[in-house]
Amino acid sequence: MPEPEVADDTTIPDDEILWRRVPPWHVTDDPKRPEGKRPATAAFDEDDMSVSIARETSVEKILEAHEAFSLVGFPASLAREKGLRIVRKPLAENPAHAEVIGKKTDSIRKALSKGSEWVHLNASSLK
Amino acid sequence: MSRVLKAEVDSSGKVHFLPLVSVSYRRPFHGVSIRQGWILSRESFTSAERAEVHLPALDERLLSLHARLQQLKQLEANWDLHGAAPIDPSVLTYVMTFLSRVIDRDVPLPQIVPRVRGTVQLEWHTKSKDLEVYLDAPEVGSFLFEDVDRGVEREGNIRTDLPKLKEILHELNA
């Protein structure tokens, strides 16, 4: 019997910003962006995609032990508009941890990339 | 303009194409065809211990992507610190095969990006256009194109819609 679908956590408001770590491999050149870089759509590939609730953490905490990584943020509403669900999944090392659940088609990954803004763009990615 | 690459004959008589050991490349020139780093047809090399292969200018451009492919080949499991799979060598090999079909002098080279599932995607981004090609396995993949200024989106399959993809690639700099 298939497991019941996990419900969207409506205590997370639509205007909540969700942060997603971006490995250096997923920072790509794009002249349309003011910084000249975009998060690759490949950075939004997982069905259970880890994010952090911005209001409940800090950039320093999220990038601890991930020095080479960059960080993007997108509103919870963007994920919901694409039919994705957001669920809190607190971890010992990151109580603000949550997951954006649902299949990420090519067009959904593209929407997440397009709708994300840089919170921290690692300097080595700018070279 | 041409590039000279070295090849060597091993004790079994097979010719190793040194700089492209892990890269699939199939294009006949000078009577030689090469696939997966091996010279398959070696009329010119039967008695040679070393041989030189002259590649035309277009091939030189594709060779510039070789270093990136080698980097991706070295990625170990968990390269994203979140459980990513190592990149499937057959997909890396296929990248060059695919590009040799769609790239010519008028088409810019792509960025090659690894995916956590162990495949790759190719990306072209210009001031007004985005094109991404997702290579899931040899001969299996799709593409997604957007012309931001014109509000046009197109998608397709890399095999059945190859002419459409080539047309898009030639429009990238337009």
Image (tube, coloured by chain):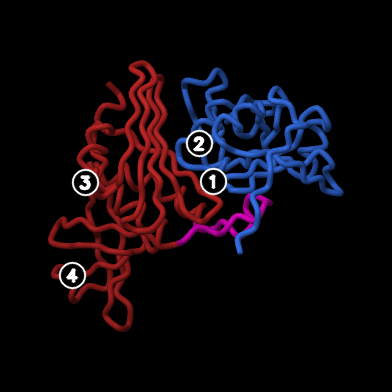
Nearer to us in this view, A86 or B60:
A86
Distance (Cα) linking label 1 and label 3: 44 Å
* Quarter of the view holding residue B146: top left
Residue at 65% x, 41% y is A100
Of tags 2 and 4, which is closer to the observer?
Answer: 2
Pointer 1 and pointer 4: residues touching (CB < 8 Å)?
Answer: no
Q: Report the residue that reaches farthest toward the right.
A: A92
Residue at 69% x, 25% y is A14
The boundaries of the magenta stretch are B73-88
Distance (Cα) linking label 2 and label 4: 48 Å
Pointer 1 and pointer 2: residues touching (CB < 8 Å)?
Answer: yes
**Secondary structure under badge 2?**
helix
Tell me the blue chain: A
Q: Earlier in the sequence, mark 4 or mark 3?
A: 4
Residue at 83% x, 32% y is A57
Amino acid type, residue under disc 3 in the picture: Pro
Whether residue B121 sits left or right of residue B143 in the image: it is right
> Residue beneath label 2, please?
A108
For mark 2, name the chain.
Answer: A
Pointer 3 and pointer 2: residues touching (CB < 8 Å)?
Answer: no
* Quarter of the view holding residue A80: top right
* Quarter of the view holding residue A55: top right
Of tags 1 and 3, which is closer to the observer?
Answer: 1
